[in-house]
Image (spheres, grey):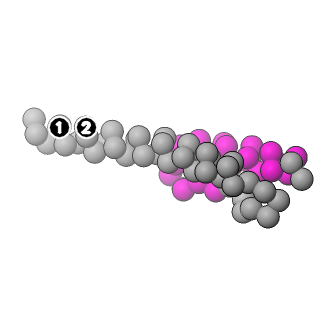
Amino acid sequence: MVFNFLLLIGTGFMVSHRIAGPLYKLKKHLGEMNRDSQNFKLREKDFFKELEPLVDSLKEKMK
């Protein structure tokens, strides 16, 4: 029972980290976006990988 609880907590932490991390990075990147900013990149295993080309195309349109 303790093992299942720890497994549940660990899995919940990993999933929330994979969701909250990209959203935090997106918010930070959009706040700092200018012509010279770097491309938007997420970690390899993050969710929302489809945001990368969208943010980069938004940056190109702002030029």
Q: Residue at x 67, y 43 (%)?
A: 51
Circle 1 Cα neighbour tier, 10 Å, few/some/many (<14 / 14–19 / ≥20): few
- Quadrant position of residue 23: top right
Circle 2 Cα neighbour tier, 10 Å, few/some/many (<14 / 14–19 / ≥20): few
Q: Is residue 51 magenta?
A: yes
- Disc ID at residue 30: none
Tell me if 35 is positioned left or right of 6 in this view: right
Tell me if 11 is positioned left or right of 22 in this view: left
**Residue 40 in the image: x percent, y percent?**
68, 55
- Magenta residues? 41-61
The amino acid at mark 2 is: Leu
Tell me if 36 is positioned left or right of 9 in this view: right
Q: Residue at x 88, y 46 (%)?
A: 61
Return the residue nearer the eye: 51 or 45: 51
- Provide the secondary structure element on which disc 2 rests: helix
Q: Do the residues labelled 1 and 2 touch (CB within 8 Å)?
A: yes
**Residue 59 in the image: x percent, y percent?**
80, 50
The amino acid at mark 1 is: Asn
Relative height, residue 33 to residue 23 (above, below): below
Q: How far apart are marks 1 and 2 (CA)?
A: 6 Å
Residue indicated by mark 2: 8
**Residue 53 in the image: x percent, y percent?**
74, 48
Q: Which residue is drawn at 17% across and 37% down?
A: 5
Tell me if residue 49 can be seen.
no
Q: Residue furthest left?
A: 1
Q: Which residue is drawn at 42% across and 46% down?
A: 17
- Disc ID at residue 4: 1
